[in-house]
Image: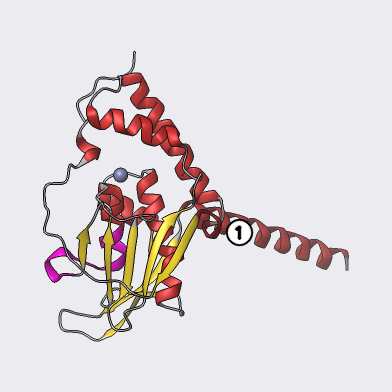
Amino acid sequence: MKTIFAILTVLLLGSCETKIKETLNQSTNPEITVIDTDFSKGRLTLKQTINLKDVERFHGHLCDGLVQGFLGIKVGLHVLYPNGILDRTNTRIVSKSSPCLTDAAIYLTGARYQYNTFYVDDSLKDGFYIMQSIDQHKTVKIQLKPDVKPPEIDLLGAQAIKGTLSACDLDKLKSLEDQFADYLLTSDPETNFTVTELTYFKWLPLEKHNYTKTDILNKNITTCK
Ligand SMILES: [Zn+2]
C-alpha cells in the first residue's frame, strides 16, 4: 500500500511540475491557432499553431510592440472567429505604422499590402489595429486600455526617434520596454486590451509608403559608458 502511495505521489508531483512548466511557457510564448490552404492551389484545411517566438524570428527582435500586437490580435480574433481559429485567407487588417505592430499584423493574419488586405493608417483613433473578417465583414478595433503602458516609454521613444537620446538612456528605454513586455505576457490580456466591435467601417486603403522605420534609427549608437 505504502509503495502504491509513494508511486502515486511521485506521478502527481511530476504532472504538477509539467503543468507549471507548460503554463509558464504559454505565458512567455503565447500561441495562436491559424488555418491556411494546404498547397499553392489548395483547400482550406491546414491548421497550425504559431507563437510569439515565430513572430520574433520574422521581425528580428522581441519587443513590447510585438508582444502588444500579438496579444491584441489573440484577444480580438475571438470576435471574428468564435471557434478561436484565425482564418489567414479571410482576414484583413489596418495597423498603425510601428514596425513592430505592422510585422505582427501581417505575420499573424496573413494580410498583405499587395492583395489589398493590409494598409497602414496613423490616424486611427483609440486603437492600434482594425481587423476584419472578409466574408462576414465582422470588424473589431483593438486598443490598449489607458494607463497600461508606462508613459515614459513613449516619451523616451520620441527622443530616440529624434536622435536625441543618450546611449545610457537608450539602455534605460530598452529596460522599460522589456519590463512592459513582461507585464503584458504575465497578466491577463483581457484586462489589458479593449476590443470594440465596429458596426460600420469603411475599408479605405492608403498608398503611403514613406513611414519611418523607427527600429533601425539608433543602430549605430555607441554603448553606454
Ligand atoms: Zn520591434
Can you name the residue that lies furthest to the right here? 1
Residue at the disc numbered 1: 18
**Vertical placement of residue 45 versus 29, above or below:** below
Looking at the figure, which quarter contains the N terminus? bottom right
Q: Tell me the quadrant of ligand 1.
A: top left
61 within the magenta span: no
Dot 1: few (<14), some (14–19), or many (≥20) neighbours within 10 Å?
few
Q: Main secondary structure of the magenta part?
A: helix
From the top left corner, tell me how far across and down residue 186 is, in percent. Answer: 55, 49
Question: What percent of the width, then of the height, locates residue 195?
Answer: 45, 64
Specify the segment rendered in magenta: 105-116
Lateral position of residue 59 relative to residue 151, left or right: left
Choose between 203 and 132: the one closer to the eye.
203
Name the residue rendered at 44%, 74% in the picture: 79
Residue at 40 percent across and 61 percent down: it is 142
Dot 1 amino acid type: Thr
**Quadrant placement of the C terminus:** top left
- SS at circle 1: helix
